[in-house]
Image (tube, rainbow, N blue to C red):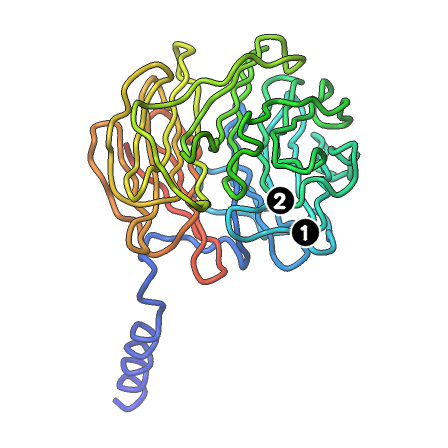
Amino acid sequence: MKPLIFIAITSLLLICCKDSSQNINDHLIGKGQMPNMVTDKSGIIHVVYGSGDNIMYASSSDGGKQFSEPVAISALPELAASHMRGPQIATASSRVIVTACTQAGDIFSFTKSASGNWQKGSQLNDVDTVAKENLMALSADGQLAFAVWLDLRDKHNRLYGAKSADGGVTWQKNILVYASPDTTVCECCKPSVVVKGNEIYVMFRNWLNGNRDMYVVASSDGGASFGGAQKLGSGSWALNGCPMDGGAIAITRDGSLETVWRRKQIIYACEPGQAEKQIGDGKNCTMLAVNGKNVYAWTNDGDIVVMKPQGITKKLGAGSMPVLARINNEHVICVWENNEKIYSQVVEL
């Protein structure tokens, strides 16, 4: 009986020693920080994150049940991968696109072809070391990709962007997306971008009259030019500092733009031109439009919270920096970081 007793005690010790902050349904993808994720048209889920100076990549072809062993896309000296700063990922017609920024302020691109090989592309910023905040976003549709970032080439933080017409292989001349009349946009909040056809929407936290409010600008010509900035919501956040929280945007099935963002310690959602709606308390929010419905995720008191389309919330476990991707009309996958590890969980809607 001694071996059976030994096995029982060992099993009990393993259960007790397991990280109690993680849910039994969580799947450990790998060690790292600042995950980003996208699902391509064939249903493959692509995840990218930072680990030291390495840009790490993993994928799932079975709806998030299992992920491939993470591989290093490339080593980028002094890779920015913490505090809202990290590699970004999007899918074009035939490629996966990743952008990553160095702490010195240069943004580089990488593409994965259908054959599975990763290739390093060009530097996105056409003036060296101007993306020193390391805050950027990426989106693509078809062969059109657009990247946006906080840029210091004019001595103050402004929004600049770059367009790729060949699925991220090459990038065109940088364009000024927005410059605040009050000198600078909010210095430490990550912008968001979404591309649909020839339409491009960029959301960012502005700094006007002492208020750190969210604004959106749009392009209808594939990023060649952008219109004026529109404030989101009716309230304002007077703040002498940066909340380091950027929110997220999505285009719904009917083509409307949806946004989610934080003001003080409250998470709000709204369409441009409509009143904001409080959906929860917390920070680091994100969203996804699935089958005409919205799914949200954020961090509250150290836990990852997901809100389903019915308004039902679910705590997934301890962590921060959640991102969402579609699996099908009934399921999404949430990926986040906790204690420098990347976890995922499939959520039924």
Q: Is residue 173 above or below residue 248?
A: above
- Residue at 28 percent across and 91 percent down: it is 2
Residues under numbered marks 1 and 2 in contact, where contact means CB atoms less than 8 Å apart: yes
- Residue at 75 percent across and 43 percent down: it is 129
Residue 37 seen by the camera: no
Q: How many marks?
A: 2
Q: Which residue is mark 2?
A: 134
Q: Which residue is mark 1?
A: 103
Q: What percent of the width, then of the height, locates residue 80?
A: 63, 51
Secondary structure beneath label 1: loop
Amino acid tagged 1 = Gln
Q: CA distance from mark 1 to mark 2?
A: 7 Å
Residue 85 seen by the camera: yes
The image quadrant of residue 131 is: top right
Q: Earlier in the sequence, mark 1 or mark 2?
A: 1
- Residue at 26 percent across and 27 percent down: it is 309
> Left or right: 192 with respect to 162?
left
> What is the crowding at mark 1: few (fewer than 14 residues within 10 Å), some, or many (at least 20)?
some
> Left or right: 75 with respect to 203?
right
The image quadrant of residue 139 is: top right
- The N terminus is located in which quarter? bottom left
Amino acid tagged 2 = Asn
